[in-house]
Amino acid sequence: MTTANTTATFHPFSRLPAELRARIWELTVEPRIVEVRANNDVEGSESVIKWLPRMRYLCSLTPAPAQLHTCREAREHLTKCPDSVYRFDKAFSELATIPSEGGPLQERYVWFNFDNDMLSVGRTDLHEFQAVAYQIRRLRFRRFISDELPL
């Protein structure tokens, strides 16, 4: 009778051993398709402000992984565990070129798991991703046959 009572009792998650909690956080990581675009200045803005350097913006509508919002322990483990296939990195900051106006430069990044996530670049020119090409393992892009034909 006491055996049934002890197995039916659930202990709070925080009281589980740290190794077990870490493994549970790892098992919540699923492959995602992460949309990333590197957009240049708005068309026509060159004629208005010629003296400003060209800027490239990093855009992604894919939300950050939910695990990173769950709690500090999950965020710390999933962003700092070395050599883990479950780790999320601050990625693609190399793609953004936003000039500094005397203040601190704000880093733009996308949370990305290079082992599990698939990078989707849509119709963005692949040359935009040349700086990070060596890291990308899974890539999805969209092209039309007419895009590849010479004019």
Image (tube, helix red, strand yellow):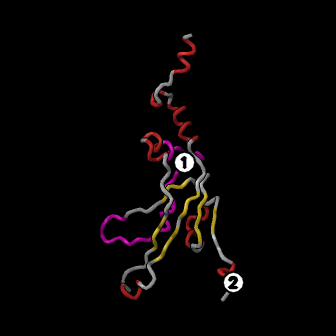
Residue 45 picture quarter: bottom left
In the picture, the quarter occupied by the N terminus is top right
Q: Tell me the tag on residue 24.
A: none
Q: Nearer the viewer's eye, disc 2 or disc 1?
A: 2
Is residue 113 placed above or below 45 in the rendered structure? above
Which tag, 2 or 1, sits closer to the chain's start?
A: 1
Residue at image location 54% in from the left, 21% down from the top: 8
Task: Count every numbered label the image shows and give the total.
Answer: 2
Q: Is residue 24 magenta?
A: no
Q: Tell me the tag on residue 87.
A: 1
Instruction: Give coordinates of residue 76: x percent, y percent.
Output: 46, 43
Q: Which residue is mark 2?
A: 149
User: Hey, what amino acid is under mark 2?
Assistant: Leu
Residue 83 seen anywhere in this rendered image of the structure: no
Mark 2 nearby-residue class (10 Å; few <14, some 14–19, many ≥20): few
Residue 20 picture quarter: top right
Residue at image location 53% in from the left, 40% down from the top: 25
In the picture, the quarter occupied by the C terminus is bottom right
